[in-house]
Image (tube, rainbow, N blue to C red):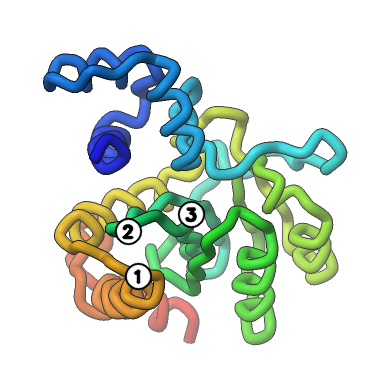
Amino acid sequence: MLMRLLDEQYTRTPYYGVIKMTRWLQGKGYAVNPKRIRRLLRKMGLEAVYPKPNTSQPNPEHQVFPYRLRGLAIERCNQVWSTDITYIRLAHGFVYLMAVIDWYSRYVLGWALSTTLDADFCIEAVGELLESQQCEIFNTDQGAQFTTPRFTQPLLDRNIKVSMDGRGRALDNIFVERLWRSVKYEYVYLQELQTVQQAREGLAEYFRFYNQERLHQSLDYRTPQHVYWAGSS
């Protein structure tokens, strides 16, 4: 129950750290202390200091690339792709979701689920995408899943520029952050997901809806698929 409450409040107020989360729960009548809340946030993969999900920790041996999107005009499909990882709760446990989104069209190009934060599921999902298409710039955070050469080298081999968020800057990857809010408020929080398989099937249907049916005001009330297909043809 505490993890469910923390997940929902974090989605509303990602800038809340351990102390604010503790005070918020205490205000709701829960007898918790900062030590317990810090442990739960870490278990969920949520950063307690920065306004960024701490689903990926940096590896000091990996190269960190500069952030290349500040002030950049996003003018076409496949100009910028970005990815991130978020926590998805189940009735008894949780999984991690990663997705790749095209910045211009908001189209979700691919996604994957994992029960661990190992880099493999991210590498495999992006590798499948690169077999048929590619972008000009690929943006990630500075987590070890994305800084490992196993992730960055296939991008560099295709002359794709690698961009990485500033440490603790959630808004550097704003379109993925908005996607996570949509996924949670429009699907996850409305369900009682029991198993990984149920989550996988439900998210597949949600992303189909998101791409093909969900109208976006920022896209002049068109769907991501409409904009992406028109811009990629």
98 and 222: which one is in front? 98
> Which secondary structure, mark 3?
loop
Seen in the picture, residue 177 relative to 82 is either above or below; the reply is above
Q: Which dot marks residue 195?
A: 1
Q: Disc 1 on helix, strand or loop? A: loop
- Residue 182 has which mark? none
In front of the other: label 3 or label 1?
1
Q: Mark 2 vs mark 3: which is more N-terminal?
A: 3
Q: Is 218 displayed left or right of 111 in the figure?
A: left
**Mark 2 surroundings: few (<14), some (14-19) or many (≥20) residues within 10 A:** some
Q: Up-down: is 44 above or below 104?
A: above
Q: Which residue is mark 3?
A: 74
Q: Is residue 152 visible?
A: yes
Q: Which residue is mark 2?
A: 90
Residue located at (60% from left, 38% from top): 165
Left or right, residue 166 beside residue 216: right
Residue 75 appears at what percent x and percent y?
47, 59
Tag 3: residue type? Ile
